[in-house]
Image (cartoon, rainbow, N blue to C red):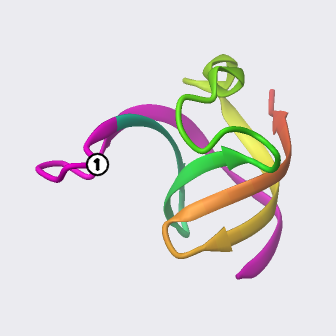
Amino acid sequence: MQRVDGLTGKVSRGPFGSGSKSERMTIWLETPEGRFVLRRKGGPTFGDRALDKYVGMRVSCDGFIADYMLLAERIEILP
């Protein structure tokens, strides 16, 4: 895992795992550093409705990157 602070990007909703048994819609954070599945620390693994309010927004996050996922400890909407 890699610690990140102030990682900024746009939140979107889109497919994950296309063509596999685990195919589903998920919340993504699109950044210059890459595209990461966005999860809240302590939140559910799938279907975290608390992330819906960030879709379409530009945000700044602190947390940990593990492979293709950002486990966010803080998410702040940017102006």
Does 31 appear above or below 57?
A: below
Q: Is residue 17 magenta?
A: yes
Q: Quadrant of the C terminus?
A: top right
User: Which range of residues does the magenta coloring cover?
Assistant: 1-24
Outermost residue toward the left in this view: 19
- Report whether 12 appears left or right of 59: left
Outermost residue toward the front in this view: 21
The overriding secondary structure of the stretch rendered in magenta is strand
- Report whether 9 appears left or right of 79: left
- For the image, the number of numbered tags is 1
Does 30 appear above or below 56?
A: below
Q: Position of residue 3 (x, y in %)?
A: 81, 77
Outermost residue toward the bottom in this view: 1
Report the front residue among 16 and 35. 16
Report the front residue among 31 and 42. 42
Q: Position of residue 55 (x, y in %)?
A: 57, 24
- Which residue type carries mark 1? Ser
Does 36 appear above or below 51?
A: below
Q: Position of residue 8 (x, y in %)?
A: 71, 52
The kind of secondary structure element at disc 1 is loop
The residue at which mark 1 appears reads as 22
- Report whether 24 appears left or right of 30: left
Q: Is residue 61 magenta?
A: no
Task: Tell me what residue is drawn at x 48 percent, y 33 percent.
Answer: 12
Task: Tell me what residue is drawn at x 67 percent, y 38 percent.
Answer: 44
Q: Position of residue 74 (x, y in %)?
A: 88, 46
Report the front residue among 20 and 53. 20
Task: Tell me what residue is drawn at x 25 percent, y 43 percent.
Answer: 23
Q: Quadrant of the N terminus?
A: bottom right
- For disc 1, the neighbor class at 10 Å (few under 14, some 14 to 19, many from 20) is few
Report the front residue among 41 and 28. 41
Q: Quadrant of residue 7?
A: bottom right
